[in-house]
Amino acid sequence: MDNCIVVIIGESRYGVLVRAAQEIAEGFRQFSGIPVVEVDLAEEKNWEVFVDALVSRKIQPKFIFCMQAVGFDVHTTKGNLFFDRFPYPLFGWIFDHPYYHGSRVECLNGGNRILACINQSDTDYIERYFPGKATKLFLPHGGFSSKYAFNLNFRDRIPAVFFSGGYLAVEESLQKIEELHETHQYLVKQWTAKFLKKLGGGSTSYLLTRMLSRAISGVSARRRKSIDRSVYKNC
């Protein structure tokens, strides 16, 4: 199939990004006027079918859209990046902090890969800790219309605010922090306190970068990157 758009859909917690990718695919259909092929990775065979179609040129897309940049870091048996063998642009959109997609960010090569982040501070983070990784941009996301949204008048809803909490128990998170090297413990606790108090405002990346700049000035970029990732991982 020539002149189409491919949307690669990976798995996500609660399926929220699956729905996002599906709605994006539908938007491409409505506004581009060309066929859209969805590759749902929930079924392993779908990836195999897609790869076979690419290699055999049965499908030649205008570009490939990858939710969460899925596919950016796929390598061949010879160690080369799989998608580098094709001329098609690869557009990845990550909804998490770049820290969680380090291997995919590393694969930005200034070629046919484009990476979009939902926060401006995320692109700043890539610029700071992955220097030379080109073709990145800030692209905020919208929301979804809920099928329940108009079933109940706002004034009739009992909870004024719904707060879902976190995924981990506080005790479990504290235990992980206590297992760190004492220097990392100090940085994590300092950063957490500043973040919770919202001192100076700004995003988590902004607060972390400002704190690290003051606390470990003179430390090499490589070492700073290691400390930074440790703090992110445990906060």
Image (cartoon, rainbow, N blue to C red):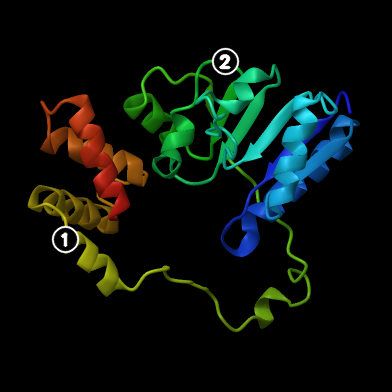
Q: Earlier in the sequence, mark 1 or mark 2?
A: 2
- Indicate the amino acid at tag 1: Glu
Q: Residues within 10 Å of mark 2 (few under 14, many from 20)?
A: few
- The residue that label 2 is drawn on is 111
Relative image position of residue 135 (x, y in whole percent): 53, 20
The residue at the far front in this view is 77
Res. 59 image quadrant: top right
Q: Is residue 191 left or right of residue 124?
A: left
Q: Is residue 223 visible?
A: yes
- Quarter of the figure with the N terminus: top right
- Indicate the amino acid at tag 2: Gly
Q: Nearer the viewer, residue 135 or 75?
A: 75
Q: Is residue 120 visible?
A: no
Residue 19 badge: none
**Residue depicted at 76% across the width and 28% down the height:** 54
**Residue depicted at 48% across the width and 72% down the height:** 164
Relative image position of residue 194 (x, y in whole percent): 22, 52
Res. 129 image quadrant: top left
Q: Residues within 10 Å of mark 1 (few under 14, many from 20)?
A: few
**Residue depicted at 60% across the width and 34% down the height:** 92
Q: Is residue 195 left or right of residue 190?
A: right
Secondary element at tag 2: loop
Relative image position of residue 228 (x, y in whole percent): 25, 40
- Quarter of the figure with the C terminus: bottom left
Q: Is residue 186 left or right of residue 188?
A: left
- The residue that label 1 is drawn on is 179
Q: Nearer the viewer, residue 143 or 86?
A: 86
